[in-house]
Image (cartoon, rainbow, N blue to C red):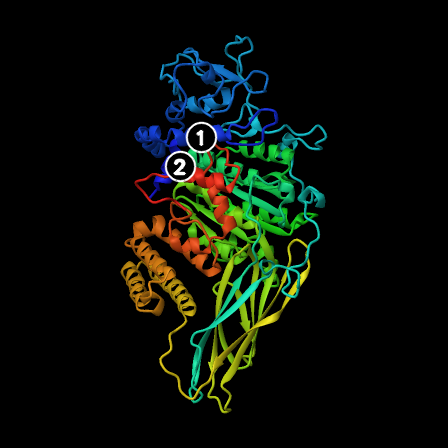
Amino acid sequence: MTSKWQKAKMALGLNMCLYSPRSNHNEPSSAATAAADVAKHLSESLSFSSVASEHSQTRTPTSSFPGSLLPRSGSKSSKKTCAICLSSMKSGQGQAIFTAECSHSFHFHCITSNVRRGNKICPMCRAKWKEIPIGSPIPDASPNRRFMMDPLAGRAQDDGYMTLLRRTPQPRLGSSRSISSLVHGPEPGCFDDDEVLHDGAAGIGKRTPLSVDNPSGSSSMALNITTHPEVPAVPRAACNDNFTILIHLKAPKTSVLDRSQDRNRSPRAPVDLVTVLDVSGSMGGTKLALLKQAMGFVVQSLGPADRLSVIAFSSTASRLFPLRCMTDSGRQQALEAVNSLISKGGTNIAEGLRKGFKVMLDRKFTNPVASIMLLSDGQDTYSISSTGLGISKRRVDSESLLPDSVLQQNIPAVAKIPVHTFGFGVDHDATSMHSISRISGGTFSFIETENVIQDAFAQCVGGLLSVVIQELKVEIESTVQLRQLKTGSYQSSVDAAGKTGLIVVGDLYAEEERDFLATVKVPVMQSCHDEQPILKVKCVYSDPITRETVRHEEASQVRIQRPQKTGEQAVSLDVDRQRNRLYAAEAMTEARVAAERGDFSSAVSILEACNRALAETASGRARDRLCISLCAELREMRQRMSNRRVYEATGRAYMLSGLSSHSWQRATARGDSTSSNSLLLAYQTPSMEDMVTQSQTMIFGKPPSSPRRRKQLKQALSFPAGPHPR
């Protein structure tokens, strides 16, 4: 169900002008003014609930709400301010102004979005217009009615999307390539034309490697490893064949992303990001408009050391531009390319992915972090019959969407480029999208309602921009027999003798946590020692900034007491809650198998039995937050697999997104919001949460400049009748 917060966002003008850096630095920013107006007139906004409701249903631009934020008297101040975007209107600033018959003036690009579908009502005075600003510029137009040529005139534009281009800095004269050549030029055979990396652009200098052996370093700069045995003691004469030990990892803390800080000072690893976007015919209208808006947010979130490339696919796929640094000129070109997208044709996910991976594999230079984001709202209609794409017809459909180079068995898990997939709407192929993400090491998010696509992108990008550990491997040495490692989707192995084990974790975001369970056999103790060592945990990883290998030499050791007798012992809640998480994930997998064969009654029974079992565990009786969230998640899944129609519409995608989140222990968007389930927030890192907050607190497309200001605006916009959104 769409939250009241999301409805408020729609009422506040979701499809209005988006924010981008101004070319005129002398003009004061109107963000504070706009935010103050919104908070001041919050009570007025409630009277427009019917307008907001209609807006959220039709997803078409409306100006009744923003127009109400300004006086209708046609005062001098209102004539200097556009009633739609609340930015100043002044001649000579490169922005065309449209003056209507009723004498009210607006930015031309703002009002054209409002009237694109034939709306002839003034947002200020509600007067009906005889003429509306649509079409090419009129050469002999009077000074009172000025038009601006759309930079992409002749291209079909989707309703509801306001381009960021008109308020972005123009490329420097020294720019070697224009956007026209990037978008419309022929694609090279080898995508080795990526922009050269400049170390100085990132502002990343040498620093002390992440190491616990650094005496002067802060503890927050080291990977933290802790272990928890299920009980503290085992009697000497007893043998426990399945003694469980929890291995807990927490990545070091890094500075929270803040737009008020200079991007060049950001002490983080720069990113190479390729977005593979579905622009088939089914993505038309509001879907494509919101996708463009979400991509605008992604572009603005990247720094000058980060590089972006965009692949658009329908019946075929094309690279809009090579990997470009997101400097001012790079953003300008990226935004113009995204704005040029139109929806048509079929859905060829395989070709889009092939080109996305080709960009990554052919690049001459490499940033430390690399990832692909894939969004689609349909099912691939070309993978079976396509030829010449390196696709084998003998594979199952889900694997046929990935190129051969990704499916090679000799590629180490830590070297894979993760594909984070986003299933959009109820018609996408959730099974294939989930398989793509699982095989590549990425996550699968289910975007049920189209107005949260930007939040889903924001959460993913917030993680990618905060990678602090790479190529992490956990090494386990056991003095007893190591029987099993329960690691979800992470690659793990135990040697034949049961003495050593290995877990390949890969990348960790700042303050991200991982929990793994090791099962050992505790034998009868022949000696008279009161304590017995069980295992040691070490790790090795790479610092993404210095590119140095770091060894965590100070091992975390597990010891248990071996007295003659033990009384009643309480099971560790840390171990119990992770057992519950794994048990719930196994029940979800089993229920999904039953649902896929059409046995929905059995699927529901499996989830109900799991729910009852969790309530009887130690953490369930203690009302542990994780256990409560798991039970709530199981109830939601039962509702979404009550019958075939509901399961195929949303149940399958909802369940697969949850399984992706649990197996990787990483936050995904699911349902109608990134915060639809409190359990998923347990995986959300502070950097991811901060980026989602920036997305959710955008006022007319411009994000607040500080975390404190974002929190104030979020509180001001929260409805007293409902819970405050996280």
Asked whether, in this view, residue 198 is left or right of residue 183, the answer is: right
Is disc 2 placed on a helix, strand or loop?
helix
Is residue 127 shown above or below 208? Answer: above
Q: Is residue 701 visible?
A: yes
Amino acid bearing label 1: Ala
Asked whether, in this view, residue 23 is left or right of residue 36, the answer is: right
Comparing 574 with 334, the one in front is 574
Is disc 1 placed on a helix, strand or loop?
helix
Comparing 591 with 232, the one in front is 232
Instruction: Name the residue carrying label 2.
Output: 716
Is residue 637 shown above or below 515? Answer: above
Amino acid bearing label 2: Ala
Residue 695's x, y, as percent?
A: 47, 40
Is residue 9 shown above or below 474? Answer: above
The alpha-carbon separation of the residues under discs 1 and 2 comes to 10 Å
Is residue 203 shown above or below 48? Answer: below
Residue 15's x, y, as percent?
A: 44, 31
**Which quadrant does the N terminus fall into?**
top left
